[in-house]
Image (cartoon, rainbow, N blue to C red):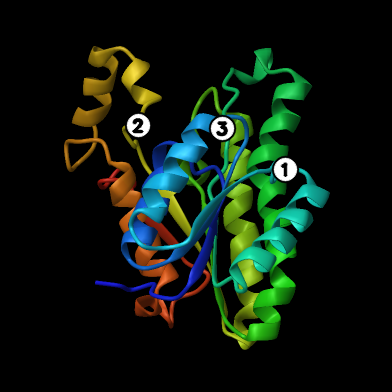
Amino acid sequence: MNLLQGKTAIITGATRGIGKGIAEVFAQNGANIAFTYSSSVDAANKLEKELNSLGVKAKGYQSNAADYDQAQELIKDVLETFGSLDILVNNAGITKDNLLMRMGEEDFDKVIEVNLKSVFNMTKAVQRTMLKQRHGSIINMSSVVGVKGNAGQANYAASKAGIIGFSKSVALELGSRNIRSNVVAPGFIETEMTQKLDEKVVDGWRNAIPLKRGGTPEDIANACLYLASDLSAYVTGQVLHVDGGMLT
């Protein structure tokens, strides 16, 4: 199926984990892909080659979405190269976990800047193009933690909860121009990062999930595919929980 044939998507933080999964599934469905990365040049080149081999146009950009001017510049570059922009996936994010009593101001500010301010920056940067063409799908990556909180992650939870409020407001502002804004809230997703954790701890987490497994990047990518495509043409302002039943 080519649900995104002829569409152009921009995905932030796409060289590994969930972002990479989204880029691959979107490309398999015919989308041209512009993606950003912060430092991993080799991984970016490899992904660019892999996506191009699927018969779509793909290009990686070393860009920091948390920087307002860089986000503006990025969208200008993407439009020059691809000619259009139909889908924005705000996926870039970091964690700096600690109990509140031990959390420094810098660790709070940095997580808010990278996880939440970047969503504002990128949405502002694509807004004019989407308003002009009178269509667009914006997908923002939140987390189960942004909905229910988590001890030791006050900064991360605040950033991910903020994304939900921001996305719902954008949905209300831009709906009349046929621009949709939705949120995906992943649960425990198994990526390169979780492979480094203690197996017993991970098993404990799996057993607490109704579906008895962690999610895969592809599970999240398929939810994003739905929200990016015309299958969800009448869906906006929603939070799609992809968490194996964690919040049930």
Tell me whether the residue at label 3 lies in contact with that at label 2, contact meaning CB atoms closer than 8 angstroms.
no
Query: Which residue does the image show at 65% across and 61% down from the upper left?
Result: 78
Whether residue 35 appears in this view of the structure is yes
Q: Label 3 sits on what residue type?
A: Val
**How far, Cα to Cα, is label 2 from label 1?**
23 Å
**Element type at marker 1?**
loop
Categorize mark 2 by other alpha carbons within 10 Å: few (<14), some (14-19), many (20+): some
195 relative position to 209: left or right: right
The numbered mark, 2 or 1, whose residue comes first in the sequence reads: 1
The numbered mark, 3 or 2, whose residue comes first in the sequence reads: 3
**How far, Cα to Cα, is label 3 from label 2?**
19 Å
Q: Which mark is residue 191?
A: 2
Q: Label 1 sits on what residue type?
A: Ala
Q: Position of residue 32 (x, y in %)?
A: 47, 64
Q: Nearer the viewer, residue 243 or 3?
A: 3
Categorize mark 1 by other alpha carbons within 10 Å: few (<14), some (14-19), many (20+): many
Q: Position of residue 203 (x, y in %)?
A: 21, 22
Query: Which residue does the image show at 33% across and 66% down from the upper left?
Result: 29
Q: Position of residue 104 (x, y in %)?
A: 74, 18
Give the total of numbered labels. 3
211 relative position to 95: left or right: left
The residue that mark 3 highlights is: 41
Task: Please say if 165 is above or below 130.
Answer: above
51 relative position to 119: left or right: left
**Element type at marker 3?**
helix
Q: Nearer the viewer, residue 210 or 82?
A: 82
Q: Position of residue 177 (x, y in %)?
A: 63, 86
Q: Label 2 sits on what residue type?
A: Thr
Query: Which residue does the image show at 67% across and 15% down from the upper left?
Result: 101
Q: Which mark is residue 66?
A: 1
The numbered mark, 1 or 3, whose residue comes first in the sequence reads: 3
